[in-house]
Image (cartoon, grey):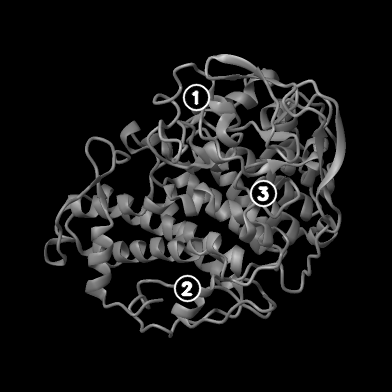
Amino acid sequence: MKNISLKSIIVITILGMISCSDDFTNLEPIGSVTVANFWKSEDDAIQASNALYNEMKAQNMFGRGFFWYLNASDDMVTGRVRTDVDNAKNFIMTGDERSFRNMYEDSYKVIRRANFILANVPDMSLNQELKNRILGEAYFMRGFSLFWVAHMYGDNDTNGGVPIITVDNMNDPAGSFKRPTSVTENYNQIVEDLKKAADLLPLFTQYDSKNYGRAHKDAALAYIAKTYLYWAQYDNSQYANAVKYCDAVTNSGSGRALIDTNTPTKDFRITHSNLSNWASEYIWSVNSSEQGGSILTGVMLENKGWGKYNGWGYFQPTLELFNEFEVNDQRRKVTLLTFGDEFPYFGETRKYQSENSLSGFQFNKYMYEFQSADAIGNTVNSNGNNPTTDYNVPLLRYAEILLIKAEALIMQGQNGDNEINMLRDRAGLSPISNATIDDLKHERRVELAGEFANRHFDLVRWGDAQSTYSTPLHGKTHDDRSDPNSTFTIKEIWPARSFDPSFMHVWPIPTNAVDASKISQNTGW
């Protein structure tokens, strides 16, 4: 952490803030503000809470940033030559990689902003309902941000956790922040923050539309459940807590539920579209539009978008992922495009082909908004260098709550069939009985493929990463890549990798962050 005085940090934070017009997502600079006149009014407090969400839309956070790490899984390959990302996929990082510099520090930037709210807002004269909401947002965003850096960089072994920065120690001098002995201390802090958030925040359904995208009670409860799931790899007793908080989401009163109209051919497609941004399956996402948000939608699009749009062509699915889907699983065609598949694209029906895809596949989950002839400027950003759409890229949706509960039940020797079969029913598949942990792993993979659910970390925490990564990845190499109906040969597109679980279970902390904070680097890298 940089040694900056309290007033200096407040000024930096203020100057980075945004204000609202009639909608808190309509972001505009707040103009000239000084420390002396801040933390005085209701508007100051609202502006401070708005600033908590700035990094959510940053390319280096939930656009591409954290997804570079998720790219390590067996579900995808990088797709284009990007040396530092390819090195990460091959687990030969040093901490100096440019593509990975920002996520750690930007997460702590959000934590710092949350701490300033928690330090100042309690003493402000505000409407109690508003004060509770703003404090709840700060607790949520502090816990959410720590969640990401904790499980990516912390362990219960030689490295320990990542620094815990709260109101009590946020003004300590640079170099004094220590890593806790275990990441479980981080998980405990995350749960503590999220419980406070859940107590203070309204249900999502209690917001008016102008405030959609703010933290809410169900999001806090959901991330408590996911934190307990991750914690359980070190302490089996936490599985029971994961179940408890999954049930808390289900029974909160906000109506969180799968989007399931008993139409398997349509339900999963509608789930992954702007039509369902705020529907019953929503829990937490990157609030996006044709003006800004998560760029993941365009990053996954065919490189140069068949001449129609500036797609970036990254994160190409593997044959291994394609083959994981069962016959007649309706999720497959929504999740993936393979040669010959028909899909709507800027007012026409195309058959998928690619002269760029190494695997012969593309993720399809984020394609709905590209279908209309007038999509650009309406549902798709007219700036192809910022290729967002109206689809709020999901970070955690209700389907994952069902999977967390099912896994936690199975790991306790109980039955997770009900939760798994709810997902299978929506996908048009027959129910299963006495589901095993392998059944759970399968369902989690096909349900959440291409999302921020983090399959790579799933493989790590299950102890499956070493064996999974020891086999190469494959794709379909078509004889004529311009022809959707071209014949193909199955070929290796990524070689087998050596994953050493003794140290590769966590990522190296970016060197710039290590140097600035004087904390220890993760061993082995």
Viewer-side residue, 42 vs 466 = 466
Say what amino acid the circle numbered 3 marks: Thr
Earlier-in-chain disc, 1 versus 3: 3
Pick the quarter of the image with the N terminus. bottom left
* Mark 2 crowd level (few <14, some 14–19, many ≥20, 10 Å Cα): some
Tell me if residue 381 comes above or below residue 90 in the rendering.
Answer: above
Q: Position of residue 91 (x, y in %)?
A: 71, 65
Mark 1: which secondary structure?
A: helix
Residue 251 in sight in this render:
no
Disc 2 from disc 3: Cα separation:
33 Å
Pick the quarter of the image with the C terminus. bottom right
Q: Position of residue 379 (x, y in %)?
A: 44, 26
Which residue appears farthest toward the left when viewing the image? 37
Res 275 label = 1
Say what amino acid the circle numbered 2 marks: Ile
Q: Position of residue 188 (x, y in %)?
A: 54, 67
Say which residue appears at 42% left-offset and 45% top-offset.
216
Say what amino acid the circle numbered 1 marks: Leu
Say which residue appears at 67% left-offset and 81% top-offset.
158
Q: Which residue, given by chain and number where applicable, does mark 2 sit on?
A: 164
Mark 3: which secondary structure?
A: loop
Viewer-side residue, 525 vs 382 = 382
Q: Please state if 308 lies on the left or on the right of 474 as rendered.
A: left
Viewer-side residue, 187 vs 6 = 6
Q: Please state if 180 lies on the left or on the right of 265 as rendered.
A: left
* Mark 3 crowd level (few <14, some 14–19, many ≥20, 10 Å Cα): many
Q: In the image, which is nearer the foreground, mark 1 or mark 3?
A: 3
Earlier-in-chain disc, 2 versus 3: 3
Q: Which residue, given by chain and number where applicable, does mark 3 sit on?
A: 78
Looking at the rendering, which quadrant does residue 232 occupy? bottom right
